[in-house]
């Protein structure tokens, strides 16, 4: 029996050193590398026998920032939670849609909101949309949802979730700021 070792890195860059047998070519596009890595993953994959209902009955809404490894930071395993991510971890209509499906169809009861320090949306204004309109000739239909104060933005997110008429469970909604330098969560008290 031979074992296959898959080297995972925390960036899209290939590990340094000589390529091993079955390694992904440095000439491949990032997408090609991801597809090749999936082939290696699938070769050793075993169906965990789970359904779509999260074991911990929790949905986590967080920023898409590549520095946030939510499962590792929160001690989560595959199947523990629903994870909903977007730029800024903003509670948009689509996030409410996902949370509604998560609660009403798949049994979640708790919501954890995670923003983070040094977010790319911090300080970004609706001028971003105007600049896009000038560049491409069409105004985006979506809002940028930039903010100046991360704590206040978390409070706003908590309020949006707690007041949504579509959500069944709004009593266990908590918000946090993840510090990208220390890895620690800081809880934000609601307004």
Image (tube, rainbow, N blue to C red):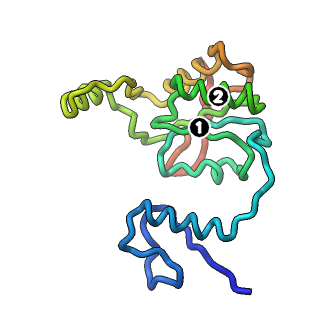
Q: Quadrant of the N terminus?
A: bottom right
The picture places residue 180, in percent across and down from the top left corner, at: 50, 48
Asked where in the image residue 61 lies, by quadrant, the reply is top right
* Residue positioned 39% across, 25% down in the render: 142
| First reached walking from the N terminus: tag 1 or tag 2 | 1
Q: Find out whether the residues at labels 1 and 2 contact each other: C-beta distance under 8 Å.
A: yes
- In the rendered structure, find residue 84 and report the number of the disc placed on it: 1
* Residue positioned 54% across, 27% down in the render: 94
Marks 1 and 2, Cα distance to the nearest angstrom? 8 Å
Rendered view: 59 above or below 138: below
The picture places residue 158, in percent across and down from the top left corner, at: 60, 23
Horizontally, residue 51 falls left or right of residue 162, namely right
* Residue positioned 75% across, 63% down in the render: 46
Rendered view: 159 above or below 31: above
- In the rendered structure, find residue 100 and report the number of the disc placed on it: none
In this view, the residue in front, 93 or 67, is 93
Which residue carries the number 2 mark? 99
Q: Secondary structure at mark 1?
A: strand
* Residue positioned 49% across, 37% down in the render: 86
Asked where in the image residue 154 lies, by quadrant, the reply is top right
Asked where in the image residue 5 lies, by quadrant, the reply is bottom right
């Amino acid at each position: 029996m031979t074992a296959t070792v898959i080297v995972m890195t925390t960036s899209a860059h290939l590990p340094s050193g000589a390529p091993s047998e079955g390694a992904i070519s440095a000439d491949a596009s990032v997408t090609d590398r991801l597809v090749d890595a999936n082939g290696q993953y699938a070769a050793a994959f075993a169906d965990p026998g789970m359904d779509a209902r999260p074991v911990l009955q929790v949905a986590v809404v967080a920023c898409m920032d590549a520095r946030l490894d939510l499962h590792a930071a929160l001690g989560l395993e595959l199947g523990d939670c629903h994870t909903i991510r977007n730029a800024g971890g903003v509670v948009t209509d689509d996030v409410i849609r996902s949370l509604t499906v998560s609660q009403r169809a798949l049994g979640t009861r708790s919501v954890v909101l995670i923003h983070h320090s040094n977010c790319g949306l911090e300080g970004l204004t609706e001028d971003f949309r105007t600049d896009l309109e000038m560049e491409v000739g069409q105004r985006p239909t979506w809002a940028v949802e930039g903010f100046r104060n991360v704590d206040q933005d978390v409070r706003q997110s908590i309020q949006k979730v707690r007041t949504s008429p579509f959500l069944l469970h709004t009593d266990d909604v908590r918000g946090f700021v993840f510090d990208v330098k220390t890895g620690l969560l800081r809880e934000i008290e609601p307004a």
